[in-house]
Amino acid sequence: MDGKKPNGSGNGSKGSNEWRVKVGLAEMLKGGVIMDVTNAEQAKIAENAGACAVMALERVPSDIRKEGGVARMASIKVIREIMNTVTIPVMAKVRIGHFAEAEVLQALEVDFIDESEVLTPADEENHIWKRDYRVPFVCGARNLGEALRRIAEGAAMIRTKGEAGSGNVVEAVRHMRAIMSQMKKLATMREDELMHEAKELGAPLELVRQIAKTGKLPVPNFSAGGIATPADAALVRRLGAEAVFVGSGIFKSSDPEARAKAVVKATTHFEDPKAVLEAHEELGEAMRGLDVRQMEEKDLLATRGW
Amino acid sequence: MKIGILAVQGDFEAHAAMLERLGAQTTEVRAPADLEGCDGLVLPGGESTTQLKFLQEEGLADKIVRFAERGGAIFGTCAGAILLANDVKHPQQDSLKLMDMTVVRNAYGRQIASDVVSGPTTLKTELLEMVFIRGPVIERTGPGVKVLAEYAGRPALVERDNIMAATFHPELTQDTTVHEHFLSLARSRQGQRANGAKPAK
């Protein structure tokens, strides 16, 4: 082992280089599946199935939903065990606005931090100022304005919120379609219309102008929330998601190992229905889903975040 | 000139953007048949464990080895370099064994140690900018392996016959030097194959 680490002797300002390696790791995860795990054994199953990263958390979203109570950052012992067990990147969640939890996870050296609506928010107005961290952040978004606010704060990856722990893909679809169509709209607008649009979106003008020009987010755009089957993964990929997070869908199914593999296969071959069919063969029962329309406002996780 | 880019998982789009900027035609490779008609192949960054499982299960691993044996040019960056190495450590891992070198995975540490640095290269007089992301280290190179760039006294970009490997990500910079070199390698191999020359083993 070489103890020397690259130490910023490169060109350009330190700030911009930090940003580049943060978005760079997000780039490396494209096309893959990031799986929620609650212990080292599950992490190993995920890695063996071909996950490109794991998300360490105390309880998967469907259990948080069932059991209630305050959901916090996972125990350090569990996260560390997971970090020691797998060689793929390890992500962990912090509560919205809880920068002290984020500092702890950075000190622990997790590879990515998810400032997540799945946990109980610690701040009902402010998100973490993510630019101050060397560890990259991912944040959920329901629409383009929310995505751009998070990017302005320093998120290096955006994911749809979907409705976590529901086993129902409808919200992830809604959020992905919203983000994609709002970006398309920007691309058709005149420059003198962008200020008003920025105001409507509640997003910084500079980012709005950038998207009007490039037609895409300046960071990778992934999907999460309610993905439970290989076809769900293929669906969100077809709608523009560059990678997929699967939470409760794997370890709440009747066949976690087979399902994990199948979702990975469908995520890679999302444009090939035959491969998605093969992924579905021999699968047992998916997790039991919830009808989001029957849920009460207070039970929705996607509405957390501002 | 058509370059295939392994598009299982990782930063394949960044490679495509850079190669297209240089005038090459690119195609995404997800199945063995996708390699047909390619003059070169890029193995991008990403997670080597994820990519390796996929290559082995979908029959792409053998196909890539045969592509190399026929003289096809291959360039692996980061995870791609790990896939090409004869020996992989930390932990030990199977590979395509197309480059006589030993690599140590995640040798700099976790993401927090990722950085943008620069190092000397034989490809140009200025230093080469290098983006390391959870990068590996090349611990040993076998006979005949040319070192084209170094960082901190270790090889960072190497070449042997038709195979190139980088522990960093030239595709995440604006500098086209390394990809230009790969395209010229692919072009020269294309010429040799056309003339019926046997590829060097």
Image (cartoon, rainbow, N blue to C red):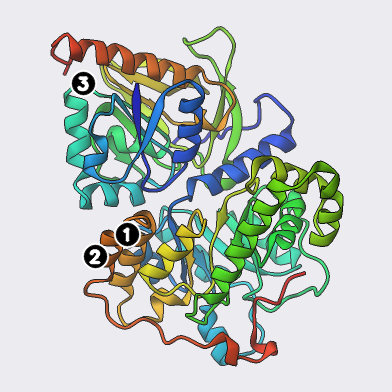
Q: Chain of mark 3?
A: B
Per the image, label 3 sits on a secondary structure element best described as loop
The answer to whether the residues at label 2 and label 1 have Cβ atoms under 8 Å apart is yes
Judging depth in this view, the residue of A5 and B148 nearest the camera is B148
Q: Chain of mark 1?
A: A
Q: Residue at x 50, y 60 (%)?
A: A239
Residue at image mark 3: B71
* Neighbourhood count class around disc 3 (C-alpha, 10 Å): few under 14, some 14–19, many 20 upward: many
Q: CA distance from mark 2 to mark 3?
A: 34 Å
**x then y, percent, for residue B43:** 36, 35
Q: Are marks 2 and 3 on the same chain?
A: no
| Residue B168 vertical position relative to residue A166 in the rendered view, above or below | above
Label 3 amino acid? Gly
Q: Residue at x 86, y 44 (%)?
A: A192
Per the image, label 2 sits on a secondary structure element best described as helix
| Residue B193 vertical position relative to residue B156 in the rendered view, above or below | above
Q: Are marks 2 and 1 on the same chain?
A: yes
| Residue A157 vertical position relative to residue B4 in the rendered view, above or below | below
